[in-house]
Amino acid sequence: MGLLESLCTRTGDLSGGQKKRLAISLELVNNPPVLILDEPTSGLDGSTSNQCISLLKSLASEGLTIICTIHQPSAIAFRMFDHLYAIADGSCIYAGRAGNLVSFLAENDLHCPQSYNPCDFLMEIGTNEYGPNNQRLIEKMLNGRNTEYRHADRVHFISSKEATSTCTKSPLTHKKDLSTGMWEDCELLSESKPNTKELYRSKSDNRLTKPKKPKMSIDTGHLCQSENVYSTPFFRQLGILLVRTFLLIWRDSSLTTMRFAIHFAASLLIGLLYYDIGNDAANAINVFRYAFYTIMFIMFCAFSSILTKFPLEVPVVSREHFNRWYSLRAYYIAITLADFPIQLICTSLFIFPTYYLTGQPMELKRFVLYFTIIFLTALVGQSIGLCVGSALSLTYGAIFGPFFICPFLAFSGFFLQRKDSPIYLTFLFDISFLRYAMDGSMLAIFGYGRGKLECKEIYCHHTHPSFFLRDMDFGHANYELSAIFLLSLFVVMRIVAFYVMSFRLRLFR
């Protein structure tokens, strides 16, 4: 396709013609039995256009069925087409071999000038530049049902008197080059070969009785079998998609770098705001607020980063998936695994500085428990964002996305404790994932037998961590239950997002 010199150029930097050729090349990746193209030569110069049509011609000669619309092809490109279906005013004015077009028009007293491209001449006829001839052609072709011009090349013969009467509207014919299989330029007929008509008719009759066999036949029966839907195994699809996803992340590093910078900058701000309060009994409430802010910041960042990802990729995924390049399952697992290390780094960039600057207990077990529960919360928020992004467009997702988090936020235990809420609403605390995130983070910091906190004031109400947990309604919290709930919710939401994505792709199609 003449794209070798652009091998290291990003797709977005290609010219319009190069993008067109690349799009055709992508359609040929898995060697489909039928290829449908919409104006493959638009945006290409004459040489590149002929090169493109020549490639399609060679593929067609090997058994591939190629159907395409084309806008004003050159004479060289037009001669490469096997069959032509022309429409004017919504009806068929010609259907048959491209080599029969000139003779068909001549039979209807529409003589193609010798210097004309037959395709341009047909377009002029279709736009009534030579008078209202469309209805006559439609009746002649029976609106496309006439198969007389589809099998053998025909020639319209006239007398030498007609041939010499005018040079601009002489009937033309094609002469076949046996070495290339192409039809050469139109030539005037003369009476110097009196037996040409009979010879041609005998050859035409032989072609009609003994049709030429194609070079190869394609058995499409196996294409309906489910195990052959994709020509590439699942794990190879997954590997290639992973490489491509990481490559896209690396190329468009501005978004990833921005995510890292935001998490680290926010961590420094929060670390300085709550500096060295971790072991101060008078600041136990502020430690609780620090934990809540950490959960909300990490969760919302994960939610927002994935919310806009799938809507932007719907056109690409739809085309590639329905072309049977890869399964939706492979794509979904690839984007899940690719974003996993990014989210892990973002969480680390926030937790490590804030945990140290706020003076939380320097115990490996507590830090691991705290980090784990925060990271699981981020994964849940990311899964909810993926569900919303898969179901809604980019605009509606950005507007309504935060409203899906608000119910969980109201029953997180930060604004209102369970013991103070109405009895008929207490069950909502049991399904709020933010409530379980608060339970796990508070137990990681204040639970598991932590000793008394330092009191630098005259009186400190929350000197004992166990008393603080009971006072803040975390006395019955269970870390294992919280982690299992968040992990289970993460799996369930990922499954839901997959089926929502599958349904969205069918609607987009």
Image (cartoon, helix red, strand yellow):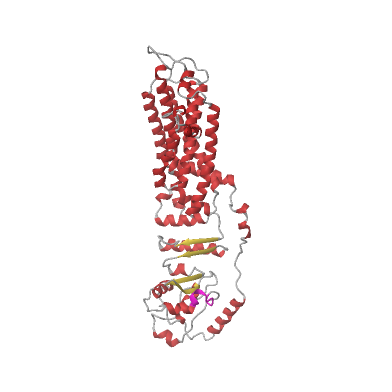
Above or below for 97 versus 308: below
Q: Number of callouts in the render? A: 0
Q: Is residue 220 visible?
A: yes
Tell me which residue sits at (61%, 57%) in the image: 224
Front residue of 292 and 166: 292
Residue extending farthest top: 458
Spot occupied by residue 448 in the image (x, y as percentages of width and height): 52, 20
Tell me which residue sits at (40%, 75%) in the image: 125
Tell me which residue sits at (42%, 80%) in the image: 111
Residue 452 forms part of the magenta stretch: no
Q: Magenta residues?
A: 141-149
Q: Quadrant of residue 134?
A: bottom left
Spot occupied by residue 149 in the image (x, y as percentages of width and height): 52, 76
Above or below for 156 versus 22: below
Front residue of 191 and 101: 101
Residue extending farthest front: 423
Spot occupied by residue 309 in the image (x, y as percentages of width and height): 44, 44
Front residue of 257 and 499: 499
Front residue of 112 and 502: 502
Q: Is residue 103 visible?
A: no
Spot occupied by residue 307 in the image (x, y as percentages of width and height): 44, 42
